[in-house]
Image (cartoon, grey):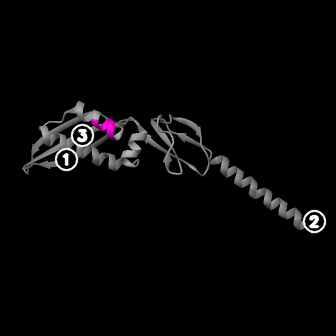
């Protein structure tokens, strides 16, 4: 009987130590250099006013999740047909300036951000036959939390 009680206590102690270790491990996270993050609690963003800078941080285990976004410039290139006989080729460097706005607008998906960026650039070009960089940058920053660092465009005949 004493042996059973002792085995039970040892087994229970091992399980408790493992659980406490897992909770402690899940309580810390690292935001990498060149990234900023947002903190979500049960899927809701709780760091709306400020982003989380690079470094080691604490969070609530189980309930909190961290999303981090690259804040260095990213290159995106695309081509799109215009007027049937011409092709607009664009090379744009962009970066995330507001992780909260970026996450809300794109669910944190880079591909979604690039497709929306492409659509905005193409629409601007269709309206004025040029790409008004200042207006476009302001719109993108306010609605998507990104800013254009550099933009090159070229129109070529497709023949």
Q: Is residue 135 left or right of residue 144?
A: left
Residue at left offset 18%, top offset 44%: 123
**Residue 129: x and y, percent?**
11, 38
The question of residue 140 being in magenta is answered with: yes
Indicate which label's residue lies in the foreground, 3 or 2: 2
Q: Nearer the viewer, residue 21 or 144?
A: 144
- Indicate the quadrant containing the N terminus: top left, top right, bottom left or bottom right: bottom right
Q: Nearer the viewer, mark 1 or mark 2?
A: 2
- Residue underneath mark 2: 2
Horizontal side, residue 107 vs residue 135: left or right: right
Residue under label 1:
79
Q: Secondary structure at mark 1?
A: strand
Q: What residue lies at 15% left-to-right and 44% top-to-bottom?
A: 88
Q: Residues within 10 Å of mark 3 (few under 14, many from 20)?
A: some
Q: Position of residue 36 (x, y in %)?
A: 46, 37
Q: For residue 91, which numbered disc appears in the image?
A: 3
Residue drawn where x is 32% and y is 40% of the image:
143
Name the image quarter holding residue 155. top left
Magenta residue check for 134: no
Please count the marks in the image: 3
- Residue numbers of the magenta segment: 139-143
Q: Earlier in the sequence, mark 1 or mark 3?
A: 1
Give above or below for 5 relative to 32: below
Compute the Cα span from label 1 to label 2. Answer: 77 Å
Instruction: Please say whether residue 109 is visible from this viewpoint.
Output: no
Position of residue 62 relative to residue 70, above or below, is below
Asked whether the beta carbons under mark 1 and mark 3 sit within 8 Å of each other, the answer is: no
């Amino acid at each position: 009987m004493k042996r059973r009680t002792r085995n039970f206590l040892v087994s229970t102690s091992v399980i408790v130590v493992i659980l406490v270790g897992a909770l402690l491990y899940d309580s810390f996270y690292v935001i990498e250099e060149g990234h900023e993050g947002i903190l979500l609690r049960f899927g809701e963003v709780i760091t709306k006013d400020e982003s989380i800078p690079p470094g080691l941080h604490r969070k609530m285990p189980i309930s909190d999740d961290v999303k981090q976004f690259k804040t260095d410039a990213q290159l995106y290139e695309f081509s799109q047909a215009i007027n049937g006989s011409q092709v607009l080729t664009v090379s744009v460097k962009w970066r995330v300036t507001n992780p909260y706005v970026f996450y809300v607008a794109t669910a944190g998906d880079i591909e979604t951000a690039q497709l929306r960026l492409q659509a905005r650039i193409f629409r601007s070009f269709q309206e004025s036959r040029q790409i008004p960089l200042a207006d476009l940058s302001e719109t993108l920053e306010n609605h998507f939390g990104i800013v254009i660092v550099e933009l090159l465009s070229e129109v070529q005949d497709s023949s």
